[in-house]
Image (cartoon, helix red, strand yellow):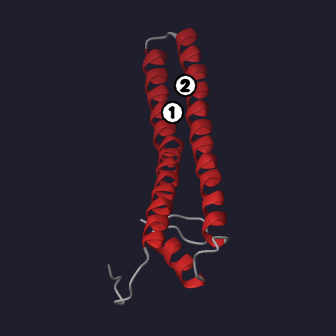
Amino acid sequence: MFDNDGETKSATYKMMLERYRSGYQGAANLDWWGRFFRRYVTGILALATAVIVFVTLADRQEEFAVAVMAGGVVFSLLGYITGRWLALLSSFMRAPLDTAVFTSPGLTDDEKLAIVSETGHSLSGKSRG
């Protein structure tokens, strides 16, 4: 029950570290899904829409091409909005975790900084990894 410096860690510290690590991991996962939706889902939908529109225009089906384009814009916007919403939830998860860590009376300042750094969360609000 020693850390890298050879100091004994309390059971409470280990329990808190695991709880915070789990919370920060959940927030990081939401953030990842948000980036995935904003970047890839929106891009794939826009690309698929463009391909279908070009194919239908080549076949002289202008009405269908307009319908596909409108649908593609709507679904691409929904993908982008979903990604932004997931990133917002991630921020809402991190804020109380940061508050809980830094206002915890049972932890020293060094332990608080260690928890934040060990969980992969930086003070700038961006996850490492």
Q: Is residue 113 above or below residue 55?
A: below
> Quadrant location of residue 6?
bottom left
> Quadrant location of residue 109?
bottom right
- From the top left corner, tell me how far across and down residue 77 is, in percent: 61, 33
* Mark 2 residue crowding within 10 angstroms, few (<14) / some (14–19) / many (20+): many
Task: Please report the residue visible at 53 percent of the width from the left and 11 percent of the height from the top.
Answer: 64
- From the top left corner, tell me how far across and down residue 32 is, in percent: 47, 50
Is 38 displayed left or right of 55 in the figure?
right
Look at the numbered disc 2 and give the secondary structure of its residue. Answer: helix
Is 5 displayed left or right of 116 in the figure?
left
Q: Which mark is residue 97?
A: none
* Mark 1 residue crowding within 10 angstroms, few (<14) / some (14–19) / many (20+): some
Is 57 displayed left or right of 95 in the figure?
left
Q: Which residue is mark 2?
A: 72
CA separation in Å, label 1 and label 2: 6 Å
Task: Please report the residue visible at 52 percent of the width from the left and 37 percent of the height from the top.
Answer: 42
CB under 8 Å between callouts 1 and 2? Answer: yes
Q: Which mark is residue 46?
A: 1
Whichever of labels 1 and 2 marks the residue nearer the N terminus, that label is 1
Is 32 displayed left or right of 85 in the figure?
left
Number of marks present in the image shown: 2
